[in-house]
Image: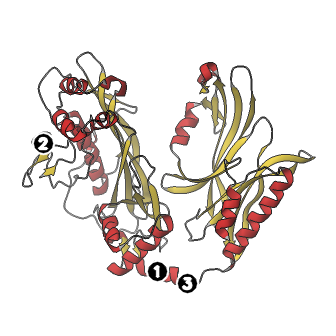
Amino acid sequence: MKYCPFCGLQCEDGARFCGNCGYQFGAETEAPRPKQKKTVLIGILVALGIIAAAVAAILLLTGRDGARKEPTTVTSEPQETLPSETIPEETTEPQETGAPKISVPEFEMQEETIEFRLSDGTLYYSNTIQYPYFTGASEAEAKLNRRYSDTIKSCKSNDTDFDEAYRTAQEWGDPSQYLPFYDDITAEVVCNERGVLSVKEVYAMWSGGAHVYYYETGLNYDIRTGAELTLSDILQGEEDQVNSVLRFYFAEALWEPSDNEISSLREYTAFTLSGNGLCFYYNVGDAAPRVEVVIPYTSEDTYAISAQELLERLREPKEETTLEGYADAVEQAMEEMYNVYSFAKGDGVLYDLDGDGIQELIVVYFAKVTYNDMPDIPAAVYSVYTMSGGAVAPVVEKELLFIDAGGPTGSVSVVEKGGKVFLAVNEENGGADETGLLRGGNWYLYSLQGAELTLEETIGYRFHTNWENNEDKIIYEDSSATINGKTEPYTALEDWLAGLSELAVAKAWPETDGLQALLNQLS
């Protein structure tokens, strides 16, 4: 037996079409999709301690023409027709391969929400699909447009009798406290260069359990030919070479996989190309963030990665002074910090910011500085170091994060945005009144190349919180953000932060002494 990748119906192995939604098995757009109908009550029954499998089978595979209402579609701006209405017919002929230049696909993000309500109007279940709509005529763009058009149509064709589902759920408890359930898809273009178009899809499913279930898929297309790229197309070499590369980089990020685990990683782990290389999204647990394992490129302009060349790089002698030099920098930071506060705690992380195979060192700590001609002002400072020619090279040295006034906070973190890695610096301070906190600060986003930092984005903000009922909540009408010199609602900052994926962080005032832990690691 097999399952329809869009509606979850169990079908015969030889079936060409899904008997519920009409999906054609083996079509170009087929891709693994979480089983939509089977998730609606699973979380509830787990939370209630009920045997989930039996009840879910009764509840979620029920499709009747009862009193259910037709789905409501809510489309965000800009409102467009479904992608399929403007998609060129798919052709089996490959595009020209001798063109000197590959056009970069252009797209705009769109969003559509499909809602399913009970007879009394209660929102029971929804699908929100955020996806890129491509405006070009290449085969790769057509395939992706068709994929999201088909996905939206499949969601709309859900014929589950949700009134019946709700009545069944009431036999086991009160499901209203968990509503609405949802099964959402967020598709993000993470690579649109090197002649490849890569999209990461994140599925988020809530069915009333202990947490939201997340699931990733990756789609990678050669822009010139329109062919979907396999792992072998990207990471090229003999099988033992490819396995050795995977073993090394997964061991760096997680653990050293066995031969059987390597086979499983190659077959089941989602991957895309990114600005820094081949990126795997490894699932360490349903509620945990995915660990991203990045294998760097071996050329400047193509997506193909040579496993043999990577192994040769890994066999090159390592610079013996790397750990020793970084340890000296950490010890110096700790000495300056303890001279200010004997109880102070610093923080630090190691991370390859520019994907050149060399980890940079980031440290944050308190020290006394001269500020506005005033000496010995306690402040948090941060430094970033890299290795050049076997020696420690400062990228940023003793930069003020904030002045110690009004309960300051802040951090220096490594984040990913749009498939690229950045250094994110946050400085914040302020005070409080009888109503709540009054604080403000800035976010700075930098890219790193070698030992050179480039400022990419700056966002300022201020906020006021409410201490009423012991709830420290943002008062939005008295809070704001400043983007490109223009005052925006505070939600603009929240949206910007939601677009960052934190990979590592060094906090200005951590709970434990991260510098001491880092020094132990370097030693």
SS category of the residue bearing label 1: helix
> What amino acid does circle 3 point to?
Glu
The reply to whether dot 3 and dot 2 touch (C-beta < 8 Å) is no
Q: Name the residue under label 3.
A: 316
Q: In which quarter of the image is residue 129?
A: top left
> What amino acid does circle 2 point to?
Gly
Of residues 401 and 261, the one nearer the viewer is 261
For marks 3 and 2 on the same chain, the one whose residue lies earlier in the sequence: 2
179 left or right of 417 in image: left
Q: Which mark is residue 203?
A: none
Label 1: how many residues lie within 10 Å, few (<14), some (14-19) or many (20+)?
A: some
- Whole-percent x, y for residue 356 in the image: 56, 70
Judging from the image, the colouring scheme is secondary structure
Vertical placement of residue 401 versus 66, above or below: below
**Cα–Cα span, label 2 and label 1:** 47 Å
275 left or right of 210 in image: right
Of residues 432 and 43, the one nearer the viewer is 43
Q: Name the residue under label 2.
A: 22
Q: Name the residue under label 1.
A: 311
For marks 2 and 1 on the same chain, the one whose residue lies earlier in the sequence: 2
Residue at image position (37%, 60%) is 271
Q: Is residue 42 among what the camera can see? A: yes
> What amino acid does circle 1 point to?
Leu
- Whole-percent x, y for residue 487 in the image: 64, 31
**Cα–Cα span, label 3 and label 1:** 9 Å
SS category of the residue bearing label 2: loop
Q: Is residue 127 among what the camera can see? A: no
SS category of the residue bearing label 3: loop
- Whole-percent x, y for residue 420 in the image: 52, 57
174 left or right of 356 in image: left
